[in-house]
Image (cartoon, rainbow, N blue to C red):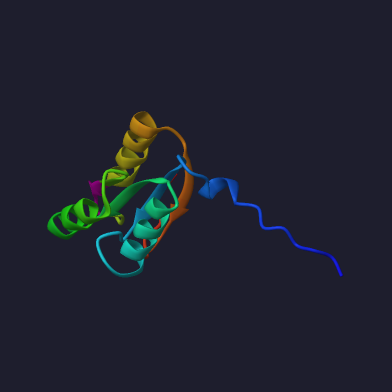
Amino acid sequence: MSQRTSEPMSALSEGNIAVVTGAASGIGLAAARRLVGMGLIVCMVDRSQAALAAAAKEIGSNATPLVVDTSDPVAMQRVATEVANQFGPVAFFDEQCRHRRWR
């Protein structure tokens, strides 16, 4: 019988950058918590400023809130540029909202 080894996925390695949409609540918030717990730097994207700020504060310093409406392609491009400039390349993208405008 062969023995399986469990190797970490490189995209989910400590210090990598993750973007989570719909991150102010529900599955998006749970994903952001988990990713920060794994050591990733998480950019939390949502359109609800108050809820997003509270969620990011609860999660801690490796969570950065970015208020944006993901259905707006211009706004999403601006966020993509901001994340790349501030943090570097995105290793993991978790889309919890229905609009996909990330490039």
Picture residue at 30% right of the left edge, 56% below the top: 71
In this rendering, is residue 99 above or below 45?
Answer: below
How many numbered tags mark residues here? 0
Picture residue at 60% right of the left edge, 51% below the top: 9
In this rendering, is residue 44 above or below 2?
Answer: above
Q: Pinpoint residue 10: horizontal percent, then vertical percent.
A: 59, 46
Residue 65 visible, this orientation: yes
Q: Pinpoint residue 43: horizontal percent, then vertical percent.
A: 33, 46
Q: Pinpoint residue 75: horizontal percent, then vertical percent.
A: 27, 45
Q: Tell me where the magenta segment starts and ends, as one range.
A: 65-69
Farthest left residue?
50
Residue 79 placement: quadrant = top left
Q: Pinpoint residue 44: horizontal percent, then vertical percent.
A: 30, 51
Residue 97 placement: quadrant = bottom left
Picture residue at 84% right of the left edge, 65% below the top: 2
Picture residue at 22% right of the left edge, 56% below the top: 58
Q: Is residue 23 left or right of residue 6?
A: left
Q: Main secondary structure of the magenta part?
A: strand
Residue 66 lies in the magenta-colored region: yes
Residue 47 lies in the magenta-colored region: no
Farthest top residue?
85
